[in-house]
Image (cartoon, grey):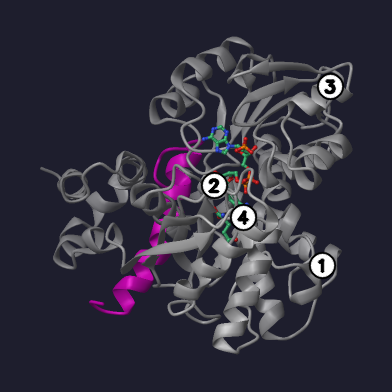
Amino acid sequence: MSYVDEVYSMVVEKNPAQPEFHQAVKEVLESLRPVIDANEEKYRKDALLERIVTPERQLLFRVPWVDDQGQVHVNNAFRVQFNGAIGPYKGGLRLHPSVNLGIIKFLGFEQIFKNSLTGLPIGGGKGGADFDPKGRSDREVMAFCQSFMTELCKYIGADTDVPAGDIGTGAREIGYMFGQYKRIRGVYEGVLTGKGLSYGGSLARKEATGFGLLYLTEEMLKANGHDIAGKTVVVSGSGNVAIYAAQKAQELGAKVVTASDSTGWIYDPEGIDLELLKEIKEVKRARLTEYAAKRSSAHYHEGRGVWSVKCDIALPCATQNELLLEDAKLLVANGCIAVAEGANMPTTMDATEYLQASKVLFAPGKAANAGGVATSALEMSQNSERLSWSFEEVDSQLKNIMINIFRSLDQAAKEYGMAGNYVAGANIAGFLKVADAMTAQGIV
Ligand code: NDP
Ligand code: 2IT
């Protein structure tokens, strides 16, 4: 059996019932084959692949908290410190009822390569809990966040592990967590990113993942002779990534016609009204039905369905495995030319393969959504030097980073004889730096 196949089998055997983690490992290892085959003896002897698929440390803890009726709840919480070869562990905290160890491991594993691609000194980590902030009062969310941080604060720090937002964790949650960290540890440091602007946050971090997604998409389109202006864009999700992806797409002259949440989706042929969407999602924390109620051009549909809308560009920005083979077939049949992943692993492997085989330009999440974590690293730099950069400064650095990421994956794909396969390019380029650092640092 080849080294890649051996390690993949080992991952499946040793990590039962973690299908998302298996999926993330499989996608990376499959595209690393040419690199691994060329260095098999050395990597095998050093057990490099076994080490890279095994987290350095996994924390599992309970989070007890009291709701507004006095009832005690207990959630399962996680922090996986996956790989610290190139910098402190860095990655978000997901708060969603679907969170389990396998989900956090898939996200942490992806984060290793994503963070490497940014060119900045950040290792891979991820965390979260099966807590659902939806429908909870601010006080209940605070109670959860404080209890969560009371335990997590023992294991994180500005130079060791720096969590941030992800699904369900936005500015409100980061604020409560930061307050509790500071209270217990007594240190005012950049231990979390995505902070509010009044206490150490970076301008443009809120916008960064969505903006970065469009900067990379624009670069990918340009490299293939297309222009984003005038294109019709379909977006899934209506959270942090989706909203700012839609905003930048509009600024670049495209028309964004959909948004979705976990209960339904809207089609607005006149183009999404972003001020209205932000008011509903960022301020009121309400459902998309409100959007349709307030805007006569919009149609609301229950369930899923954004991929059935005719578009040039599709941007999945909600969650993992939300774009299936049948959706990929619809996109291709409707003439879609590019798919860029704002979410982590939103496209299933068979859908990805179908899109690539159909010559749809495909930018994988670990490259396309890296603008969020890259800007988090810029927030860390600002915190370390106790300065704040202007919006324009951060945004222009973000844009450069995204252009450089595209170039490095394009080049890696070409170098290994897979021109245009940006999935392989991203995995290879991300892996090589981490593998080099791990090799240089010995068996640790
Ligand atoms: P948010 O919580 O702000 O928004 C998530 C959006 O996706 C909401 O519209 C939500 O709907 C929808 N959604 C979440 N889970 C599901 C589900 N199981 N089925 C259907 N819809 C769902 O999260 P973000 O925008 O921050 O994150 C979106 C994606 O982007 C995730 O994959 C995340 O890992 C990834 N990402 C985020 C980064 C960041 O900086 N925030 C950086 C890089 C990647 P509802 O409100 O109804 O639950
Ligand atoms: O998936 C991701 O890259 C994030 N949720 C952002 C992580 C971060 O540390 O900003």
Q: In the drawing, does residue 203 fall left or right of residue 400?
A: right
Q: Earlier in the sequence, mark 2 or mark 3?
A: 2
Q: Which residues are magenta?
A: 415-444
Q: Secondary structure at mark 1?
A: helix
Membership of 268 in magenta stretch = no
- Give the residue type that dot 1 points to: Glu
Depth order, front residue of 58/416: 58
Reading the image, the residue beneath label 4 is 68
Q: In the drawing, does residue 21 fall left or right of residue 203?
A: left
- Determine the residue positioned at 66% across, 78% down: 381
Q: Secondary structure at mark 2?
A: loop
Between the residue at mark 4 and the residue at mark 3, the CA separation in whole angstroms equals: 31 Å
Query: Which labelled disc corresponds to residue 393?
Result: 1
Query: Which labelled disc corresponds to residue 293?
Result: 3
Is ligand 1 less than 8 Å from the beta carbon at label 4? Answer: no
Q: Residue furthest top?
A: 333
Q: Secondary structure at mark 4?
A: loop
- Determine the residue positioned at 71% across, 42% down: 214
Tell me the quarter of the picture where residue 238 sits.
Answer: top right
Membership of 421 in magenta stretch = yes
- Determine the residue positioned at 39% across, 47% down: 103
**Quadrant holding the C terminus:** bottom left
Q: Earlier in the sequence, mark 4 or mark 3?
A: 4
